[in-house]
């Protein structure tokens, strides 16, 4: 076995794996915290919805579309001064999280908006007929009914963030992506590249499997 992985330092692999997991967990948590209310706002302010506000919806949509259209590798570089101002460094796990969140939150917000659009209109109408306030409709009708879709959206975002963390390695964020670039690519160590890719694939499969099971569990249909 050691003959097949002559260049692989398993200590470095473990350290890089932990860094990738920390980046994923930190950025996913903040993405959900910021992206969920943004997605709810996009949905509620759209034409014909509960809090219809066309101009607010247009502005939110414009901001989300602009952020989504910037390639993540460009966003990493552009955000270096902002990242340094926020966390004091553009390197390592701390330096990777701000651009990861900015790159993923608009994407997640659109998925949240789609999940809310899939909720049966009758649920909202029934809540209105019982005299529920807008906040009650959102918290007790819309979000509970959209739970399977929101879990699926979180899963898709988590998988996307895995690929983002790999790209973040290009600018010194650490993790498996950094290991793959510095050793697997730049030093032509194919065995290191293979190990990092396999670990990233395993992580994606675990995320997708857990997400699919949770979606089925909370599906009320």
Image (spheres, rainbow, N blue to C red):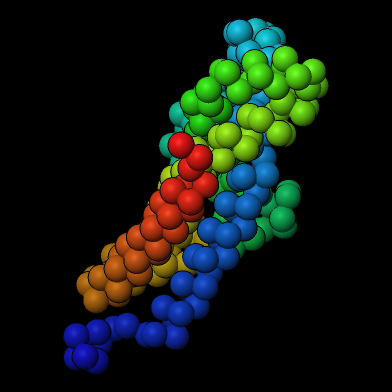
Residue at (46, 80) in percent of width and height: 14
> Is there any visible trace of residue 10 in the rendered image?
yes
Residue at (72, 26) in percent of width and height: 137
- Using the image, determine if residue 71 lies above or below residue 171: above
Left or right of 50 on screen, residue 114: left
Q: Position of residue 219 (x, y in %)?
A: 48, 42
Residue that sits furthest to the bottom in the current view: 2
- Using the image, determine if residue 38 lies above or below residue 55: below
- Using the image, determine if residue 54 lies above or below residue 5: above
Q: Position of residue 215 (x, y in %)?
A: 47, 47
Screen quadrant of the N terminus:
bottom left
Quadrant assignment, res 43:
top right
Residue at (76, 19) in percent of width and height: 130
Observer-nearest of 66 and 76: 66
Q: Position of residue 196 (x, y in %)?
A: 34, 69
Q: Position of residue 174 (x, y in %)?
A: 50, 66
């Amino acid at each position: 076995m050691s003959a097949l992985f002559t260049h692989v330092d398993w200590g470095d692999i473990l350290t890089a794996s932990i860094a990738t997991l920390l980046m994923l967990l930190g950025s996913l948590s903040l993405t959900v915290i910021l992206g969920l209310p943004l997605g709810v706002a996009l949905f509620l302010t759209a034409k014909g919805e509960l809090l219809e506000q066309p101009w607010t919806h247009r502005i939110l949509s414009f901001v989300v579309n602009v952020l989504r259209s910037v390639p993540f590798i460009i966003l990493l570089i552009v955000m270096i001064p902002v990242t340094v101002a926020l966390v004091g460094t553009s390197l390592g796990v701390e330096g990777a999280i701000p651009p990861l969140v900015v790159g993923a939150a608009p994407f997640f917000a659109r998925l949240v908006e789609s999940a809310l659009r899939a909720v049966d209109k009758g649920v909202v109408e029934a809540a209105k007929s019982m005299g529920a306030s807008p906040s009650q409709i959102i918290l007790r009708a819309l979000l509970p009914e959209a739970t399977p879709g929101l879990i699926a959206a979180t899963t898709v975002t988590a998988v996307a963030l895995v690929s983002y963390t790999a790209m973040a390695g290009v600018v010194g964020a650490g993790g498996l992506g950094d290991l793959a670039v510095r050793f697997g690519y730049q030093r032509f160590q194919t065995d290191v590249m293979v190990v990092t890719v396999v670990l990233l694939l395993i992580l994606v499969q675990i995320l997708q499997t857990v997400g699919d099971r949770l979606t089925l569990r909370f599906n009320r249909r």
